[in-house]
Amino acid sequence: MRPSTLTSALLASALVVIPVFTAASTSSGATAKTVDHHSACPSFLVRNTSLSPLHQAEAVLARMTLSEKVAFIGLAPNYAAGIRNMNPGVPRLCIPPLILRDGPNGIGEGATGVTGYPAEIALAATFDPTLARQMGEAMGREAKGQGDDVLQGPSIDVSPFANWGRNFESFGESPEVASQLGASIVRGIQSTGTIAMPKDIGPYVQETNRFNLAISTSSRVLQEVYLAPFKGAVSAGPGSLMCSYGSTNGVNTCSDAAVLSEAHQWGFTGFVRTDLGAVTNEVAALKAGVDMFKPYDPSQITQALSNKVLSVAVLNAAILRVLSTMFTFHDVIGPTKPSSTRTVTSARNTAVALSVAARAQVLLTNKNHLLPLPNGSSVAVFGSAAGLSPLVSGRGSAYVAGTGDVSDIAGVRAALPSSTVLYDAAAPNAPNVATVGSPSPSATLPGFQQASVQLTGNPSGLVDFSLTTVDAAQLEMDGEPVIQAFDSTAGGPSSTYEKAVQLSGDSQSIVLFWRLGQTVPTLAAAPVQDVLQRVATEAAASHYAIVVVGDQDSEGIDRTSLALPGYQDQLVAAVAAANPRTLVIVHSGGPVLMPWIHDVAAVIEAWYTGQEEGTAVGSVVSGKTCPSGRLPMTFPTSDAAAAMLPLDGWPTSPASLNLDSTGGLLIGAAYYRTHGITPLFPFGYGLSCTTFAVSRLSVSRTSSGYDMAVRVANSGSRAGREEVQAYVTYPSNTGEPPLQLKSFGSISVPAHATRTVTLALPLSALSVWMGSHMTVIPGEYDFNVGTSSADLPLSAKVSVP
């Protein structure tokens, strides 16, 4: 039925009730202002709950003017209200603005009174869809409480590269983990009435030059790796999607009709918005299936309509998708008045955050059963990340200002109340000794200027150099680059690059380069040899030592190396040399190098775990929590051995990326296995406080696929949780990489007990892209089950018809 016909029919009866804002209780007891819809809204808008959301949307659309339609699909900020993304709504028809907020890890954009949840990479380490749904529900409750209609998350792009700057916002290297946990978060968010927005559909794997990056890849790689998580998320019924930056195979990714129509074929019925600045042609994107834009130039749409380049029908279709989604999620009838300062955190929500943070901790080594540490001992804790500068979150749109961040040092002290706990941030107490001279045009780098750098006192020993810049810059010493910064954040927030260099005391030629016309970078240098000597003395005097290290990943910046910045490696080495009972806690958004791994007694990968980070760390260190986290990404031994984004063209940012030549289907564990590279720690790896053994794999056919029943025995004296993982090797004629993770299950087992976990494997999970569609190739498949990609003691051959 056409909108005009439908509207006439509806006006003969009662239509819809559309109050602007209704009272809404929050955890703090505050209520939003109530508007009397009978007096505030046009008389033709009255309640008729028998109408479907689509029919309600069509009725409103029929009453909209052309100018209202053109304005409706644009997103803009309202900084006075603390909102970065909202459309104007249709005030004349009592259609309120649609409010969208960044939220992969909680309510972002500077909102206060909210909970800081663990990063998605930490959630991925739990391998637990149930926990993911709980976190989604908690975030959805807070978004709804602050009056947000859409939570822009989860981020479900698969990461094939260890140095991607947004690894912390992803679920890691496995499409299966991203698919299952992404779908669970969507279900959790939307169970609260908040719209989820999985992002960014299309291959998104690089920050450097992301706006202009030209990605090329085969249809098979695109479908099986980069679109697979979105297909899984769509099965959960998200109300919206966000499209990605750059271009894919020559087409602007946010204007790729093939990708967007693919989503609709999966069953997606919601609306699509662009990531910020992702679209190069609004008219083309609108025709391709994009529904909301930021930034937005309405004159482009108006001109295209006037010139008959764009039909009103295409514009109407976009508006209908947005409006019908709003009606479906009750964002028109009775929305809560938005407030980015309304307190919505609660004990219930922080309990979820703590549960995820504790379950995410991955115990990598534990020599001589160092952990748990006994209460009542002396402990020396080192590192600025332990308390001076806690790493609870990555930077960028995913940053959440939680309520009451707990640092590691606070968490350890609370968990070991009878222990004497010394804290030394191990920060240099020496002043900056670097002085940048007068700039002059560079003779060796066209387009750059340079200045010599002098070090006061000609220091010897380890000196930490710190370079802060908003554009491409390089610090060079005796003709060799020490720090290189790409221009991925040009014009945006500054970024700091740090590296420690061993100086001999002889004069070095140090030169700083930066692009002509740009702000002079800030350079600082601080001798840290005295710091290392001090911490060694303090470590030797304590029974146990803890070093907290890390790196703060960020949207907009890719890592040029997996090495910890600054002198953190040297700090660990100095402490470990002084105290053999040294524990290292790592806060990172992905893999880091650990050159000291064999010199320390224990290592915990603690990720960015939000405001409850310190409590979670203390819980594991003290033994209150039995570690159960598993690595969702492979940890390599070196940069050279890692699957890395090619960032070797400094100062020119990479303009293109061929995903087939950098690995294709061989991502993550398959990359290392196929290239014969032994990683530092394999995908899926993690130790426990107890001892598990898996046995008796039994495979049975079901109506939808296969069930794999596995017995899990706990022979230890403590209860614990095991993450059982199932990997599939396809028939050789499929051309698939071997041992792909296709199912997993988390199970808690009491001490000296045995439990059975059943892993479901839908037949669709075995499908591969052939020609133009996904299909299951008949043949003999190997099912391998174990506790990591490198520990698979159980196997079964299954003939798939």
Image (tube, rainbow, N blue to C red):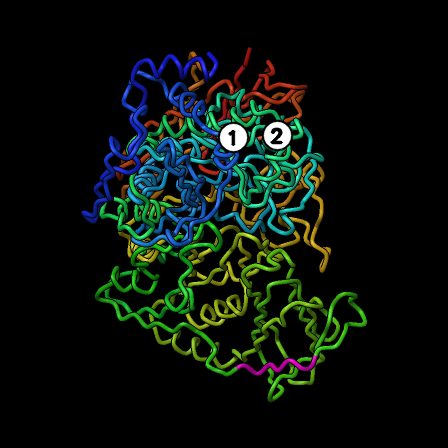
Establish if 560 lies above or below 120: below
Quadrant of image for the C terminus? top right
Depth order, front residue of 222/565: 222
Q: Picture coordinates of residue 437 (x, y %)?
A: 67, 82
Depth order, front residue of 476/693: 476
**Residue stretch in magenta:** 432-438
Q: Picture coordinates of residue 553 (x, y %)?
A: 51, 55
Type of amino acid at the residue the image marks with label 1: Leu
For marks 2 and 1 on the same chain, the one whose residue lies earlier in the sequence = 1
**Label 1: few (<14), some or many (≥20) within 10 Å?**
some
Residue at numbered disc 1:
66
Q: Is label 1 in a helix, a strand or a loop?
A: helix
Q: Residue furthest right?
A: 443
Which numbered tag is attached to residue 305? 2
Q: Is residue 582 a member of the stretch shown in magenta?
A: no
Establish if 481 lies above or below 180: below
Quadrant of the image occupied by residue 725: top left
Q: Picture coordinates of residue 369 (x, y %)?
A: 36, 55
